[in-house]
Image (cartoon, helix red, strand yellow):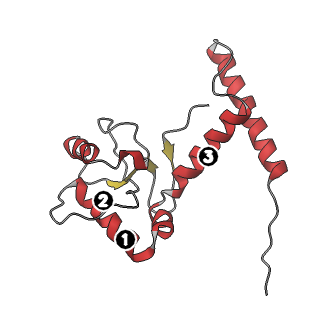
Amino acid sequence: MAPSACSSTAVKSASRSCQSPSEQCREERSFFSGAYDTRAFYTALGRAGTPDIDIVIPPSRRASASRAATGTRRQRDEAIVRIDQVGRRQWRKETGAHHQARAENGVYRYKQIVGDRLRTRIPDRQKTEAMNGVAIVNKMASLGMPESKAIRI
C-alpha cells in the first residue's frame, strides 16, 4: 500500500503533502516531515513559486528564529515563535501536523503485519492484494483497540 499524498484536516480546507519542492502544490497547506527543515529546502520551495502556501514543517527542538528571515523561511520562524507560545503538541494540533504522524503510523503497521512489498506482478492482483492487506490491518486494529474511560478522583 502506497501512502496517499493527499489528506484532509479540520484546520483549513484540503491539504496536500508534497513529495518534493519542485512538485506543484496548489493547495492552501503543505505538510513535510521534519527531515525537510533545512535552508536548502525552504529556498527550493521559494524558487518553486509557493509564496501563498502555508508550509508546515516541524522545526527541530533546538531551532531558533532568525532575525532577517524572508519568504518561505519566515513561515518557519513564525512556527518557532508559536511553538514557544503554546508548546509543540498544541502547535501540531493547530496546524494539522499530527495527521501526518497518524498516516505514517498506519503505513508502518501495514508493513509490519503484511509486509513491505506486493508479491504479485499483475496490477489488478496487486490492487486486490493491497486491499486484502488493508482489511487485515483494519480488522486487527478493531479487535485490539482498548476501550478507555475517564476516571474521576
The circle drawn on residue 116 is: none
Residue 142, given in percent of the width and then of the height, sits at 80, 49
Q: Residue at x 45, y 67 (%)?
A: 91
Query: 10 Å neighbourhood of mark 3: few (<14), some, or many (≥20)?
Result: few
3D distance between C-alphas at marks 2 and 3: 25 Å
* Dot 2 or dot 3, earlier in sequence: 2
State the residue position of label 3.
Answer: 105
Give the labeled residue for mark 1.
82
Quadrant for the N terminus, please: top right
Looking at the image, residue 99 sits to the left or right of residue 125; the answer is left
- Count residues near mark 2 (Cα–Cα under 10 Å), then give few for <14, some for 14-19, many for 20+: many
Query: Which of these two is toward me, 99 or 69?
Result: 69
Q: Is the residue 119 above or below the residue 11 in the image?
A: above
Contact (Cβ within 8 Å) of mark 3 with mark 1: no
Residue found 45% across the figure and 72% down from its top: 87
* Percent position of residue 32, x then y: 41, 47
Residue 129 image position (x, y, % from top left)? 71, 24
- The residue lying toward the viewer, choosing from 65 and 7, is 65
Residue name at image x 46 percent, y 67 percent: 88
Q: Calculate the distance from the C-alpha at mark 1 to the C-alpha at mark 2.
A: 10 Å
According to the picture, the residue beneath numbered tag 2 turns out to be: 76
- Please tell me whether residue 124 is drawn above or below residue 37 in the rendered image: above
On screen, residue 57 versus residue 39, left or right, reads right
